[in-house]
Image (cartoon, grey):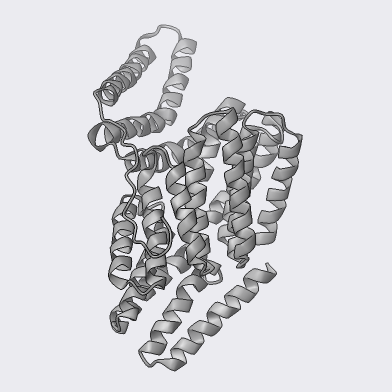
Amino acid sequence: MTGNQVQSEPKLTETSTSLLPWAMLICFFGIWILAGAVLVYLMFSLPSTTDRWITATLFLLYLIFSPSGLAVSMALLGVALVGCEAAAIGARFVTASYAPYVLAKNVAAIFHMKMPAWITSLTLGGTSSALVSYGKFKEAEKMLKEAMPEVEKDFGAGSDLWFELQLELAEAYTSTMRLKEAERILQRCEQEIAKSSNMLIHLRALTTYRRWAEVCEARGDFAASEQQYKQAIAQGQSAMEEISRSMDDLRGDVAIDMAITLCKAHDFERAQEAAEQAVKFKSSNFLQGIFLSKWNFANGMIELSRGNLDKAEEFFNAAMTRAKPYAVLYATEIADIISGLAAVEAARGNTDRAQEMFEEALATKKRVHGGNHSDVADVLEPYAECLRKGGDEHKARHMSETAQRIRDIARQS
């Protein structure tokens, strides 16, 4: 479907809700509570002091990793109730990801011992991912830099954990406009990919190209960003052929990101083509709320460019409805939607209302990325147009100059 024909939201394959999650939830809680009760009983009943100390240590580890258990339970409960992936994501990021690594590291320090490699592998990736997702880029950078030498020693450069942490560090650098540092990491990842014979090589390459696309977009080089997204999609095709058809979902996620990048480049016809391609790739409802939010946002931008304000507003509102369950993790995406709705209001002449919405979007972008990120310029530019329509030429000129300064800094980064 191309041209000016208006699309409706795609219907993705639904995952049926069955009794299995409930059964898993009951079994998990039962085992969890039973294990804790047994350890407490043994801690106070064993005759040997040494045995009691061993049991106490096991109980301490049980407490350390119980947040992970709670997260799994919350995820299963969410799936059992509504089939909502937001429950799983929230549980993982809020509970399982952030607590275990920090606690395990502190326990190891108390006993003056080196944290076992398997515990590092189990907890570190989730913790760093949580920090990046919540916009705590400095904390993520500090932790990743401290952990990387040990990860390289225990797992080796090019290992799965090494790739995961390097790509998260690159994302943190991109989010704070330290693009040259992000580039150095991605170049190192490409070198390791070239040397690797691991069957997951195409999946690593897909994520690496996706990060490259984000760096290019932050710099304002939308053509280069599009090429990197296309490279990522090609790697997804190879991964699908060699590993699993589930890689199609990843290609769908990459294609919809490319559509949004093309919207920012004002290439709306090709943005629509990319959005259509994304729907063809997206074969299941895994993370469908996030995907459909982005799909609706891209189509809202396309309809706005055509002057179809009512349809654009409908798409933006649908995007907001889809995004709200992920508000904690996707604050900047929600800010983009608010900015889109503000542009609709400005086009209708409701400049006072539009300015309030632009201010809300701008505050979120600055809170997450600081004042010099290209995402801030993405809001400032339509905000300046709104101010001109409202007759505030002085403030509009200031907004435009600030946006241009950010773009100039980004190109030199």
Quarter of the figure with residue 12: top left
Quarter of the figure with residue 384: bottom left
Task: Reply above or below: 412 against 347.
Answer: above
Residue at image location 63% in from the left, 46% down from the top: 208
Q: Nearer the viewer, residue 64 or 239?
A: 239
Task: Reply above or below: 187 against 269.
Answer: above
Q: Position of residue 160 (x, y in %)?
A: 62, 33
Kindly tell me whether residue 141 is visible in this rendering.
Answer: no
Task: Reply above or below: 98 against 337.
Answer: above
- The quarter of the rendered structure image containing the N terminus is bottom left
In the image as oriented, which residue stretches furthest toward the top? Answer: 47
- The quarter of the rendered structure image containing the C terminus is bottom right
Q: Nearer the viewer, residue 4 or 160?
A: 4
Q: Position of residue 395 (x, y in %)?
A: 44, 89
Residue at image location 51% in from the left, 43% down from the top: 251
Residue at image location 49% in from the left, 60% down from the top: 271
The reply, left or right, for residue 310 in relation to residue 173 is left
Task: Reply above or below: 384 against 262.
Answer: below
The reply, left or right, for residue 69 in relation to residue 25 is right
Kindly tell me whether residue 299 is visible in this rendering.
Answer: yes
